[in-house]
């Protein structure tokens, strides 16, 4: 997975003291070392498209995924042999980690990555 060029990276450093005990039993020696630990956090400055998407939002499939996974309690991964096609319309049932959404389609509920669909604009 590639990270976008417009993301900003912040680094935090802290020094942790570790006590290392060498040998076993009585008369063993101990040493103390300082170790630098860095934590990196990436933030995206692009507005996420997931802000438009929420539970109950209508969506339209723009590209058929090669593999689809059912959103059952025991999911089943199957090859998309024409089950989900571009132009299919559904509703978001729930949000899953890493931009995966449970989408209710006419044929059932499936876990679909957010890159395969977009929000459906309804005219009032």
Image (cartoon, helix red, strand yellow):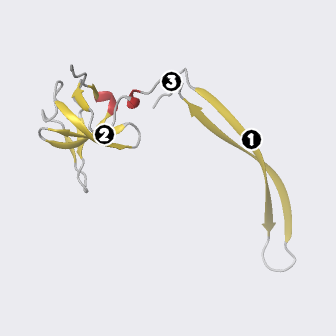
**Few, some or many residues within 10 Å of mark 2 (<14, 14–19, 20+):** few
**What residue is rendered at 25% in x and 21% in y?**
121
**Few, some or many residues within 10 Å of mark 1 (<14, 14–19, 20+):** few
Decide: is 88 above or below 71. Answer: above
CB atoms at circles 2 and 3 under 8 Å apart? no
53 with respect to 81 (left or right)? right
Structural distance between the alpha carbons of marks 3 and 1: 24 Å
x then y, percent, for residue 4: 50, 23
Structural distance between the alpha carbons of marks 1 and 2: 39 Å
x then y, percent, for residue 99: 38, 36
Structural distance between the alpha carbons of marks 2 and 3: 27 Å
Decide: is 101 above or below 89. Answer: below
Residue extending furthest toward the front:
124
x then y, percent, for residue 102: 27, 42
Q: Quadrant of residue 96?
A: top left
Q: What is the quadrant of the C terminus in the image?
A: top left
x then y, percent, for residue 8: 60, 26
* Figure disc tally: 3
Local SS, label 3? loop
**What residue is rendered at 85% in x and 59% in y?**
32
Compare marks 3 and 1 and give the one earlier in the sequence.
3
46 with respect to 91 (left or right)? right
Q: Which mark is residue 13?
A: 1
Q: Which mark is residue 4?
A: 3
Q: Quadrant of residue 116?
A: top left
119 with respect to 109 (left or right)? right
Compare marks 2 and 3 and give the one earlier in the sequence.
3
Q: Nearer the viewer, residue 46 or 76?
A: 46
102 with respect to 79 (left or right)? right
Q: Which mark is residue 55?
A: 2
**Few, some or many residues within 10 Å of mark 3 (<14, 14–19, 20+):** few
CB atoms at circles 1 and 2 under 8 Å apart? no
């Amino acid at each position: 997975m590639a990270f976008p060029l417009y993301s900003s990276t912040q680094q935090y450093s802290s020094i942790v003291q570790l006590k290392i005990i060498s040998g076993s039993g009585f008369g063993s020696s101990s040493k103390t070392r300082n170790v630098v630990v860095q934590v990196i956090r990436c933030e995206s400055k692009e507005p996420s498209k997931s802000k438009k998407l929420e539970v109950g939002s209508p969506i339209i499939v723009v590209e058929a995924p090669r593999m689809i996974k059912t959103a059952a309690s025991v999911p089943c991964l199957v090859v998309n042999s024409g089950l989900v096609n571009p132009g299919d319309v559904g509703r978001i049932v729930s949000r899953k980690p890493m931009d995966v959404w449970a989408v209710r389609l006419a044929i059932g509920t499936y876990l679909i990555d957010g890159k395969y669909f977009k929000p459906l604009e309804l005219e009032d």
